[in-house]
Amino acid sequence: MMKRNILTTAALLFAFIVSGQSPGEAKAILDRAYTAYEVSQGIILSFTSTTMEAEGTTYMTQTGKAFIKGDSFKLEMEAMDIWFDGETQWVWLKDVDEVNISNPTGQEIAAISPLALLGMYKNGYTLKAPRTQTVNGKKVHLLEMVPAVTNRDFKAVSVAIEKSSHTLVQVILTMSNGMTNKIDITDYNANHKFSAAEFRFDKSAHPEAEIIDLR
C-alpha cells in the first residue's frame, strides 16, 4: 500500500501550470504546458504528501524531493527512492536495503509517468472553469478535472496554480474509494539540466543492496 501511494505521489507531482477563466481556455493552457513540460531540461520539486481516508483521517504524511525530465524521474523519500528512465523502474527500499527492478506495462506507466498523468486531460476528463482561492497563503487559480466515465481510479483531480508566478502550489487526487492524496509543493525550480544516468539506479552507490529483478 505504501509503495502504491508513493508511486501515485510521483505521478501527481506533474499535473501543473494551469490557469484561465473557462474550460476551453484551460485546455489551451494545458496543451501549452504539456508541450513545455515535454521539452523541459529539468525540474526539481520539494513536496509534502498527505494521504487521507474518506472520513478525513490522515493515513500517511511524507516529505520528499523529485527530479524530473520528460517522462523520466527520480523520487527521493524517507522510506524509498525510485528511479524511472522511461523504460525501467528501480525501487530502493531503504529499511531492508532491497532494490526491485521492473519494466512497467503500458497501464502501469500511465500510473507512474509524470508526462502520462499530465496528459490525462486529453482523454476522458472534463475540465471545469478555474476558480480563485487562497491555498497555503497564496492566491491561486483552482482547476478541477473530473472523469467522463465513473469506472476510473481517479474520481477527481484538483490543481492549484499561484496567480503571480504561475507555479504549482498544490495537487489533490480523489480516489474512487473516497481516499485523497494531497501534494503541497514547498519549492519549485525549473532551471536544471539532467543526464540520462541520473534516472537510473547506480549499483556502485549501494554495493550491499539486494537486487531483485522482476523483469
Image: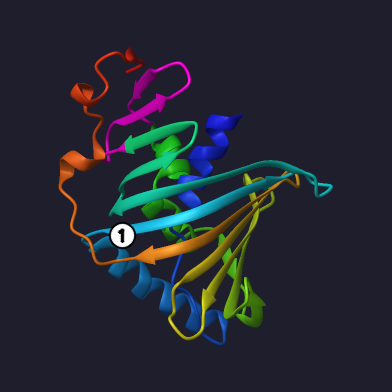
Q: As displayed, is residue 59 above or below residue 105?
A: below
Mark 1: secondary structure: strand
Which residue: 18% across, 58% down? 193
Residue 187 occupies quadrant: bottom left
Left or right of 35, for residue 141: right
Disc 1 residue type?
Ile
* Span shown in magenta: 84-104
The N terminus: image quadrant? top right
x, y (%) of residue 54? 79, 46
Residue occupied by mark 1: 43
Left or right of 3, for residue 60: right
x, y (%) of residue 177? 74, 42
The reply to whether the magenta stretch includes residue 91 is yes
Q: Can residue 20 be seen in this snapshot? A: yes
Left or right of 7, for residue 201: left
x, y (%) of residue 209? 32, 15
Residue 199 occupies quadrant: top left
- Give the number of marks: 1
The C terminus: image quadrant? top left
Q: Can residue 13 be seen in this snapshot? A: no
Which residue: 33% across, 65% down? 189
Left or right of 118, for residue 22: right
Which residue: 50% across, 80% down? 19
Residue furthest to the right: 55
The reply to whether the magenta stretch includes residue 1 is no
